[in-house]
Image (cartoon, rainbow, N blue to C red):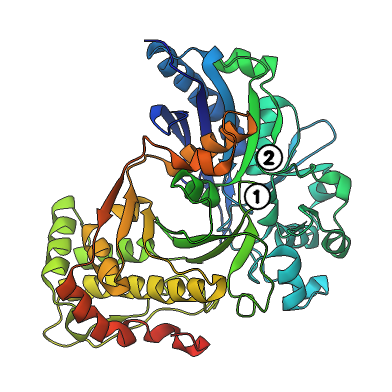
């Protein structure tokens, strides 16, 4: 069967996997392919993405996808555009001949230290330029750290590219950045949608070493002849640097207009909502949340995360399973958590396995467990972890509503954690709101594909692209009895965040 309309491809270069999603204009997934994202771990917290492996894996993955599409009746000529999304913060250097120089540190690499003050910027100045919460993960701090190491290679770099920028360059021969991913570098001015002269000067980074920042959803270039030969793609097919993977995932779930909130749970948990203009330091409670460009024109994201969302639950199940965990043990633990009473028999957990995330923004704070008694079992402990994360969502949702002025009638869930039935029941009850679960696979890849559709002129607007009629939503409604129980427990479950005065 031949294609009934244009095909859009979204590439998601994630922390764990590379994924390619081919979709129709209605959001239906036509084919997928994937490869592992290879990471090299070293001493003292060193973690680098293996870009040499990425090059070969990217081409092989797209060749697989093209072959699967052709077998289903969708020839390469039907592909209208390709969007590329990636993790943020990670970068690589190229010399004048285009050879890679130095490492590509992951976003979780911990060799850097906070560097905003070294740039001569106050917290308010930093936020109002970049829209980023003050942290050490941004590219600008990593570049300063590498320069201070005295590495010989640093001085030979002619171009700095983030991961999606690098993939787009390998596919097209064009160097181009996107507003959302450039924001994650800490080098961009989110208001001008361009590189910040003030930060570049303070950091000692030459403007001509960075690619131009194109408007959101603008085509960077076309597939090169060499890349077409390696993959089976049609030379000249438009390639769009879709940008940061998290907002792409939001767009893949329909996040396009103010008043919508998405809760995405994987290893970490992130909440995002849309605003029509960048909010200032004071408007965001003193820079409590990131506020940076969305992957679609004319929209910005208010964004917060907790580093150990699903990671906390994985850690708890591993801890409670003993030295030789098996799937049956994990299933039994979750059955015990389901059977445990609301409030977990008094067990309380502060879910700060890797720092607090927003709104506390205390990177070095660690979690605690309290309320243990002889009656507390493994089920109570695991349920307490789930309830703690639901409390985090409740606190941040209330702050989102206060900052934006938009009431949120329902919450959109995505990510692997959205498949956790107990977590969904508890969240729905504690929030007293229905949860919507889009039945879409690989939402970051789907979002990148939709951004490609905007860039290729397939869609007239982002709102049209976000409708995705083929993507159905499953609803989880709050259970009245559980709502009443958790209303009484709410102050205790949100206690850990009260020291910012918003509990």
Q: Is residue 159 visible?
A: yes
Q: Which mark is residue 165?
A: 2
Residue occupied by mark 1:
181
Along the horizontal axis of the image, is 367 left or right of 92?
A: left
What's the residue at 27%, 61% (across, down)? 424
- The local crowd at label 2, few if under 14, some if 14 to 19, many if 20 or more residues have their Cα within 10 Å, is many
Query: Looking at the image, is 93 positioned above or below residue 431?
Result: above
Q: Position of residue 373 (x, y in %)?
A: 17, 88
Q: Position of residue 134 (x, y in %)?
A: 66, 72
Tell me, yes or no, whether the two marked residues, 1 and 2, touch with CB atoms within 8 Å.
yes
Q: Nearer the viewer, residue 250 or 308?
A: 250
Along the horizontal axis of the image, is 495 left or right of 217?
A: left
**How far apart are the two marked residues, 1 and 2, measured between alpha carbons?**
9 Å
> Which is more N-terminal, label 2 or label 1?
2
Task: Give the number of the mark in front: 1 or 2.
Answer: 1
Query: Looking at the image, is 345 positioned above or below residue 332?
Result: below
Q: Position of residue 453 (x, y in %)?
A: 57, 32
Q: Nearer the viewer, residue 163 or 402?
A: 402
What's the residue at 46%, 47% (across, down)? 254
What's the residue at 21%, 86% (across, down)? 346
Q: Which mark is residue 381?
A: none
Q: Position of residue 229 (x, y in %)?
A: 61, 12
Q: Is residue 357 visible?
A: no
Disc 1, SS: helix
Instruction: Indicate the quadrant where residue 185 lies.
Output: bottom right
């Amino acid at each position: 069967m031949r294609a009934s309309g244009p095909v859009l491809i979204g590439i998601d270069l994630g922390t764990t996997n590379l994924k390619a999603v081919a979709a129709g204009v209605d959001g239906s997934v036509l084919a997928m392919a994937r490869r592992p994202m290879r990471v090299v771990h070293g001493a003292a917290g060193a973690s680098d993405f293996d870009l040499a492996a990425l090059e070969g894996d990217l081409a092989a993955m797209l060749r697989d996808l093209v072959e699967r599409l052709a077998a289903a009746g969708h020839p390469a000529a039907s592909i209208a555009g390709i969007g590329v999304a990636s993790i943020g913060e990670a970068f690589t250097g190229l010399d004048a001949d285009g050879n890679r120089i130095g490492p590509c540190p992951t976003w979780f690499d911990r060799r850097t230290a906070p560097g905003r003050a070294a740039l001569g910027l106050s917290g308010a100045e930093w936020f109002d330029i970049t829209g980023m919460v003050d942290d050490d993960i941004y590219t600008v701090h990593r570049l300063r750290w590498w320069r201070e190491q005295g590495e010989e290679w640093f001085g030979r770099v002619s171009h700095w590219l983030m991961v999606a920028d690098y993939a787009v360059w390998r596919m097209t021969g064009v160097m181009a950045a996107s507003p959302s991913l450039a924001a994650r570098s800490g080098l961009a001015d989110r208001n001008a949608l361009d590189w910040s002269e003030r930060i570049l000067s303070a950091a000692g980074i030459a403007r001509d070493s960075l690619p131009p920042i194109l408007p959101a959803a603008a085509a960077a270039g076309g597939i090169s002849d060499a890349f077409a030969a390696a993959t089976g793609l049609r030379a000249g097919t438009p390639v769009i640097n879709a940008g940061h993977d998290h907002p792409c995932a939001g767009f893949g779930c329909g996040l396009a207009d103010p008043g919508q909130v998405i809760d995405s749970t994987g290893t970490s948990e992130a909440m995002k909502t849309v605003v029509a203009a960048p909010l200032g330091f004071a408007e965001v409670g003193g820079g409590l949340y990131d506020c940076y460009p969305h992957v679609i024109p004319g929209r910005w994201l208010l964004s917060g995360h907790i580093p150990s969302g699903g990671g906390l639950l994985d850690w708890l199940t591993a801890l409670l399973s003993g030295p030789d965990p098996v799937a049956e043990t994990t299933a039994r633990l979750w059955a015990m958590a389901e059977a445990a009473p609301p409030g977990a028999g008094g067990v309380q957990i502060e879910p700060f396995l890797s720092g607090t995330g927003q709104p506390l923004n205390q990177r070095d704070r660690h979690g605690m467990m309290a309320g243990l008694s002889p009656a507390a079992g493994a089920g109570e402990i695991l349920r307490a972890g789930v309830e703690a994360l639901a409390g985090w969502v409740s606190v941040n949702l209330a702050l989102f509503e206060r900052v934006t002025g938009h009431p949120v009638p329902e919450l959109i869930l995505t990510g692997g954690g959205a498949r956790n039935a107990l977590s969904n029941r508890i969240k729905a009850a504690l929030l007293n709101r229905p949860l919507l679960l889009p039945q879409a696979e690989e939402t970051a890849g789907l979002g990148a594909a939709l951004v490609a559709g905007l860039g290729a002129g397939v869609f007239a607007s982002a709102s049209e692209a976000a409708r995705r009629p083929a993507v159905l939503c499953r609803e989880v409604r709050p259970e009245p009895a559980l709502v009443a129980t958790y209303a009484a427990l709410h102050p205790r479950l949100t206690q850990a965040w009260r020291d910012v005065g918003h509990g």
